[in-house]
Image (cartoon, rainbow, N blue to C red):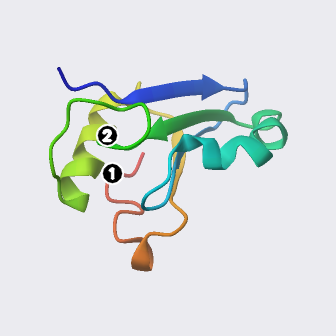
Amino acid sequence: MNDIWWQTYGEGNCHLVLLHGWGLNAEVWHCIREELGSHFTLHLVDLPGYGRSSGFGAMTLEEMTAQVAKKRAGPGYLAWLEPGWPGGESDGAHPP
């Protein structure tokens, strides 16, 4: 079974989906989670095949982006933030 690890934090009106860089996991956001969470609703994600997300084989960046986009709860998402992706190829691939 494919399962993307997803944690929601904060209570702001705008939603931010925070995606980690290559070879990391959502813990990379721990140092700024509290401050951002006071202004936004954060959605911390372990990309398919990383951290606590399990059941995925090798995937392209586009396939990973599609898997994460399926998981989001609905409209109202402000942005996808992805540090470390060369050129931010998937930034805005699935805009709100």
- Name the residue type under label 1: His
Residue depicted at x 29% and y 30%: 54
Question: Label 2, on which residue?
Answer: 69
Please rate how many residues cluster around mark 1, counting C-alpha atoms within 10 Å: few if below 14, some from 14 to 19, many from 20.
few
Residue depicted at x 43% and y 58%: 23
Residue depicted at x 78% and y 47%: 31
Residue placed most toward the observer, 8 or 23? 23
The residue mark sitting in front, 2 or 1, is: 2
Residue depicted at x 21% and y 58%: 62
Label 2 sits on a secondary structure element that is: helix
Could you give the CA–CA distance between mark 2 and mark 1, rounded to whole angstroms?
7 Å
- Name the residue type under label 2: Ala
User: Where does the image place residue 50, in percent across and percent down from the top left?
Assistant: 38, 43
Question: Label 1, on which residue?
Answer: 94
Q: Is tag 2's residue or tag 1's residue first in the polypeptide sequence?
A: 2
In which quadrant of the rendered view does residue 73 lie?
A: top left
Q: Residue furthest bottom?
A: 87
Label 1 sits on a secondary structure element that is: loop
